[in-house]
Amino acid sequence: MDVKKIALLVGALLVAVVTAVMAKNMFAGAAAPEAQAAPVPVGPKILVARKALPVGTIIDAEALTFQPWPSELLQSAYYQEGAPDADMSKLIGTVVRNAVTAGQPLTRGSLVGPEDRGFLGPGMRAITVPVNNTSGVAGFVFPGDRIDLVLTQEVEGGGEGPALRVSETIVRNLRVLATDQRIDSKGEDGKTEVKTAETVTLEATPRIAEKIAVAQSMGQLSLSLRSLADNTAELERMVASGQVKLPQGASPAEERKMMLAIASQPIDSGTTYTTGGDVSRFQRRTVPAKPVDRSQQGMEALGKMTSALTSLAGGAPGAAAVPSGPVVRVARGNNVSYVPVGAR
């Protein structure tokens, strides 16, 4: 190959390489600088609800969490991380007084504990009833649940035959405050403990507390666990029937607050009952009545008649006392005398 051609080829390659390097450097220098995100200022952390917390919910470790919050939106009523009253270990076991939605900050006053005076609702009382494995729903009743109270008893009556067996729902929508002096259902590992309680403490009005105290001496009390949807359905029924009247001109928030307050009240009206005859055709539907003694009725009627005659005879002028045995009544004008049969 000619030496000149080789030299030209090598020179062309060198020029191409130098041109490529210069072009790369030129385009690299002209590239726009990378954008960097400005650091987001992190505000204080406050306590918020992880999930919706209805009224009466027992607070556990999964219900609350700390979340950053803008400083300009911070309020003194919020539970701020690091504050003495924001200790999670102290808040577990407390009860939600006002409903909290998911993600909403908790405010002071929205939670109440057993040591607080507001643990019971205004005008409410706490009463404890004994239960067992059967009457206590096998330990599946926890603080914060709603229950109905059922009384089972036998009514003897005055007649013969078996007594009337009857069960009656005496109170509905009672809130469970504690089971065996416990206000939480969590063990040391944080899991729910199913435990058969021997006593259950309920929230009731003074009048209903009196009824429950009397019912304990009448028969066996049993707990009937309510569904959360029952309160809404019963409230709608009460509004439709006119038992609950919403105020005129109230805002939706005020109406909702009033309806929630009504839905949390225990109810002792419109109770239902079931007799033994409703369960089995071989049981009674009524109280055994006392049998009527016809002969006793006849003797009583005869005695009343005799008393009336004696009173009439004794009150007449000149009337003589009625002797015992068979007699003949002799009337002479206004004088009445009784002559024994066989006498002279």
Image (spheres, grey):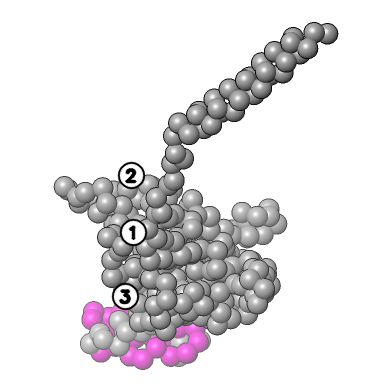
- Quadrant holding the C terminus: bottom left
Q: What residue type is disc 2 on?
A: Ala
Numbered range of the magenta stretch: 318-339
**Which residue is label 1 attached to?**
70
Q: Residue at x 34, y 71 (%)?
A: 108
Residue 267 seen in render? no
Q: Is residue 336 magenta?
A: yes
Q: Write down the residue under mark 2.
A: 240
Q: Amino acid at mark 3?
A: Gly
Using the image, determine if residue 261 lies above or below residue 210: above
Asked where in the image residue 165 lies, by quadrant, the reply is: bottom right
Q: Position of residue 189 (x, y in %)?
A: 67, 73
Q: Residues within 10 Å of mark 3 (few under 14, many from 20)?
A: few
| Residue 163 x/y as whole percent | 63, 69
- Precedes in sequence: disc 2 or disc 3: 3
Q: Which mark is residue 227?
A: none
Q: Are marks 1 and 3 in contact (CB under 8 Å)?
A: no
Tell me which amino acid carries mark 1. Pro
SS at circle 2: helix
Please tell me whether mark 2 or mark 3 is closer to you in this view. Answer: 3
- The answer to whether residue 63 is visible is yes
N-terminal of the two: label 1 or label 3? Answer: 1
Marks counted in the figure total: 3
**Residue 320 belongs to magenta span:** yes
| Label 1 with label 2: CB-CB less than 8 Å | no
Give the crowd class for mark 2: few <14, some 14-19, many >=20 residues within 10 Å: few
Disc 2 versus disc 3: distance between alpha carbons?
27 Å
Question: Which residue is rendered at x = 55% and y = 27% of the image?
Answer: 22
Instruction: Pick whichever of labels 1 and 2 is earlier in the sequence.
Output: 1
